[in-house]
Image (spheres, rainbow, N blue to C red):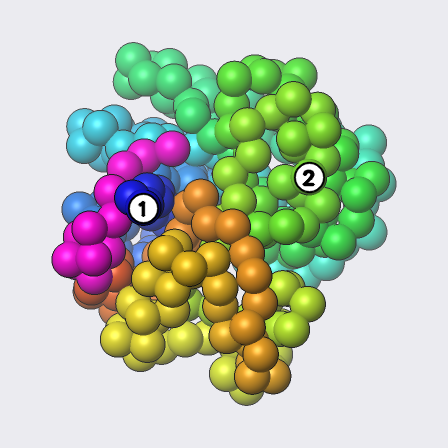
Amino acid sequence: MSHRIDLNCDMGESFGPWAMGRDEEVMEAVTSVNVACGFHAGDPDVMARTVRLAAARGLSIGAHPGLPDLQGFGRRALAVTPAEAHALVLYQVGALAAFARAEGVRLTHVKPHGALYNMAAGDPDLARAIASAVRTFDPSLALMGLAGSHLVLEAEALGLCAAWEVFADRSYEADGTLTPRSLPGAMVEDEEEAAARVLRMVTEGLVRSRQGGDVPLRADTVCIHGDQAGAAAFARRIRAALRDAGVDVRPL
């Protein structure tokens, strides 16, 4: 049986004089990029530059909308209503689409960021509002969400293409959710361990949970976080492992 997977990375998360990540290096190893839209990170100059670099490499470009929380990097839960989430996502996707249009390319997908992503994973109303915003803007866009979560299920219910996402650098709980970053072992920092986990998720549809059992999941796309140390080397090692195993790595 042949296997196919997309490798995505969150990017464009610098703003002003503050720099985060090594986006250009990571772009050489991934197939899709999710570009911050100015609310949790990024600014117009960074958005324009990131889209331009990704377009020049033929990568799939997606919007990465987050909560309006620069200080917390969008990783703090805010009490937003479904209607507010709909407006937040629509606003940010529209902003990034303008930069894509300026470079002569189109957006291919949307992936919520941080707390918005995790909140929507467990809240069907919030997930439906986000999926509705994506469909309102462009029903041809794919919506990335945690494999098996409300985000991908609501996307499919609304007729969108849902990309079930797994994580190379995060550990999992027994219920298939990601281990909270506040707990020990939440981040997988060893390249070889990450590569082995990704291969198993892609080829077997299984991941070992923090509690020790296997969790079944579907993998359409693998996330590599661009803000972690050594992200470029991490991405190269995972792509090489997939290639050596005969996995077809290509954009969504």
At a point 33% along the width and 62% down the height, the residue shown is 199
Residue 75, relative to residue 42: is it above or below? below
Up-down: is 27 above or below 229? above
Front residue of 200/89: it is 200
User: In the image, which residues are magenta?
Assistant: 240-252
| Residue furthest front in the image | 1
Figure check: 242 above or below 174: above
Answer whether residue 241 is visible to the viewer in this image: yes
Instruction: Report the front residue among 7 and 182.
Output: 7
Residue at image position (72%, 29%) is 157
Q: Is residue 248 magenta?
A: yes
Dot 2 falls on a residue whose secondary structure is helix
The quadrant holding residue 39 is top right
Cα distance, mark 2 to mark 1? 26 Å
Q: Please tell me which of labels 2 and 1 falls first in the chain.
A: 1
Badge 2 density bin: few <14, some 14–19, many ≥20, Cα 10 Å? many
Q: Quadrant of the C terminus?
A: top left
Q: Residue at x 47, y 57 (%)?
A: 205
- Amino acid found under the numbered disc labelled 1: Met
Q: Find numbered disc 1 in the image and state the secondary structure of the residue it sits on.
A: loop
Position of 184 with respect to 30 (left or right) is right
Q: Amino acid at mark 2?
A: Leu
Q: Is residue 8 left or right of residue 31?
A: right
Q: Which mark is residue 1?
A: 1
Tell us which disc is closer to us: 2 or 1: 1
Q: Position of residue 232 (x, y in %)?
A: 22, 60
User: As displayed, is residue 158 above or below residue 124?
Assistant: above
| Pointer 2 residue | 153
